Amino acid sequence: MLTIVGCETSVPNTPTSAKNTFIVTSAKSSNDGSDLFCKDFNLSQSQAEKFFNRGHEINGIELHQSYDWLNCFVKGSLSNMELNMENCSYSIQAGGTATIVCQNSLSVLWACDTCEDLLPAAK
C-alpha cells in the first residue's frame, strides 16, 4: 500500500550550504532477499550521507510526478543540526527519493537527482 500524506511540514528556508551537513549514523538494507530485483540494493553509511548531502527537499506533488517509486530501500538514522533534524530516521528508495522523520515531528521528502553512481536502479 502506498500512502501519500496531503499535509507536509517543510524544512525552514535555509542557506543552500546548510543542507550539506547531514551526518548519517547508520545504514541498513531492509531487503530480505525475496525480491530478486532488490537483492543487490544496498548503501553504506558513507553512500547514504552522500545521497542526503547531494539531494534536496521535494514536495508530494514532485514525488508523484517526477520520481519512480521502487520497493528497494535502505533505512537508518541521521542528523542535520542546521535544518533542525536531530534523532531522525530515514528510508532511501532505489528510485532516488527518501523520507526523513524526526522525533520533533518534522517529516521531509528528499530526492537526489545526481546520485546515479549511488543508486544503480535510478539510472
Image: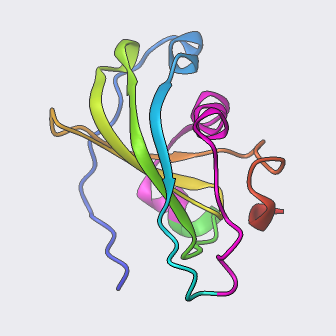
Residue 100 location, quadrant: top left
Furthest residue to the left? 104
76 vs 7, left or right, is right
Task: Point out the image quarter for the C terminus.
Answer: bottom right
Q: Residue 40: image x %, image y %?
A: 71, 69
Where, by quadrant of the figure, is residue 11 drawn? top left
**Residue occupying image coordinates x 57% and y 37%:** 45
Give the side of residue 102 with respect to residue 68, left or right: left
Q: Residue at x 76, y 62 (%)?
A: 122
- x and y, in percent, of residue 69 in the image: 57, 72
User: Is residue 42 shown in magenta?
Assistant: yes
Tell me which residue sits at (59%, 87%) in the image: 35
Identify the residue at horizontal 34%, vertical 23% (top origin): 12
| Residue 75 percent coordinates (x, y) | 44, 53
Q: Is residue 106 above or below residue 43?
A: above
Task: Indicate yes or no whether the magenta region holds residue 45.
Answer: yes
- Quadrant containing the N terminus is bottom left
Magenta highlight range: 36-63
Residue 62, relative to residue 54: is it above or below? below
In this rendering, the answer to whether 11 lies above or below 82 is below
* 109 w.r.t. 52: above or below: below
Left/right of residue 49 with respect to residue 103 in the rendered view:
right
